[in-house]
Amino acid sequence: MSLPKRVQIVEVGPRDGLQNETAILSVEAKAELIEALARAGLTRIEAGSFVSPTAAPQMATTRDLLQLLGPRPNLRLSVLVPNLRGLCAALAAGAKEVAVFAAATESFSRRNINCSIAESLDRFFKVVAEARRQGVGVRGYVSCALGCPYEGAVAPRRTAAVARALKDMGCGEISLGDTIGVGTPLAARALVETVAEEIGLESLAVHFHDTYGQALANIFACLEVGVAVIDASVGGLGGCPYAPGASGNVATEDVVYMLNGMGVETGVDLDALLEAGVSVARRLGRAPKSAVARASASNEAKRRAIQAFEAQA
Ligand code: HMG
Ligand code: MG
């Protein structure tokens, strides 16, 4: 078995996570979260999106957020843009990386961005060309890469065709999104293998939601075939507003714990990451969804109980 020596984590909590939380965080609270994630060693963070504020009101302050954060030479902050208008707004706010998002199915494309896959690719062609002209890197997502809430299972070749189109128009990295978290490890691996035949493995990232508790197993299956970029969301924040029932992305803490245990480097400090997860969950008025956060809290409670017992004895 061979695993990558080092994995890059793309922290998507501030965007993919917060876009689907009912509570809307202030710009200051979002900036604090991003600062905490950066202190934990994350170097790639998706900060927000420039989409219709009706579609994602939680993201309506992304411009103010980027301005508050200011230029960050050591951080790759990216934002999602659905069209040229979003790109222009992102560039004006100082974005140095953007992401476009197509879908593998017509129904999801229509529900998420109100156009067909072909129309979205035409739109993204212009976005990517302009971004690159301005020296800004672009990531491309393929949503519903394994399954769609409206059309069911998705054949890998459908996802591969969209991935190929995004790659051909100039996206430097393609992230395969299991938007509703229905994938299982062998299907995830088969998908990566099929897409890699089209566009190579080097530019592939995986983006698993954990609806059926399969995300870590899926990630492991993809690591085994050489994927080395993993999307994750601190505290398992989020879900997808257009995918009913979908849970948040796999929790970053759980991914880092698994990778640490296998000796795969991430550059992330798990304790600092846990703090970031607890702090944002507190702001949202609930506990973090990560298994590692729950285990750490219960270890801490046990340690306190033992200390109290010893102090009495
Ligand atoms: P539309 O209705 O077809 O387009 O929406 P429109 O041009 O008629 O615009 C509709 C309204 O949005 C108008 O405002 C525009 O001004 C405004 P109104 O006149 O109604 O007040 N608008 C914008 N506002 C701000 N920034 C913009 C912008 N563009 C138009 N850039 C559109 C089409 C794409 C705009 C809309 O459907 C949209 O914003 N969709 C985004 C939905 C979204 O954010 N989804 C979540 C992200 S995808 C995801 O999470 C999956 C992923 O994580 C991968 C995975 O999990 O698999 C990436
Ligand atoms: Mg997602």
Image (cartoon, grey):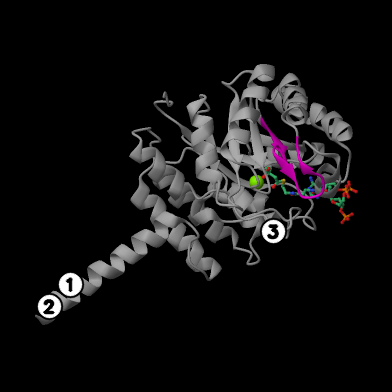
- The range drawn in magenta is 139-154
Q: Nearer the viewer, residue 74 or 124?
A: 124
Residue labelled with disc 2: 311
**Label 3 secondary element:** loop
Q: Residue at point 69% right, 58% down?
A: 245
User: Mark 1 and 3 residues: CB-CB less than 8 Å, in contact?
Assistant: no
- Looking at marks 2 and 3 on the same chain, the residue that comes earlier in the sequence is marked by 3
| Callout in the foreground (1, 3) | 3
Query: Does residue 72 appear in this view?
Result: no
Residue labelled with disc 1: 307
Q: Residue at point 88% right, 41% down?
A: 115
Task: Tell me the kind of residue under disc 1.
Answer: Gln
Mark number displayed over residue 245: 3
Place of residue 21 in the rendered image (x, y in percent of width and height, measured from the top left):
63, 62
| Callout in the foreground (2, 3) | 3
Task: Tell me the kind of residue under disc 3.
Answer: Gly
Q: Nearer the viewer, residue 234 or 4?
A: 4
- Residue 144 is left or right of residue 12, and the answer is right
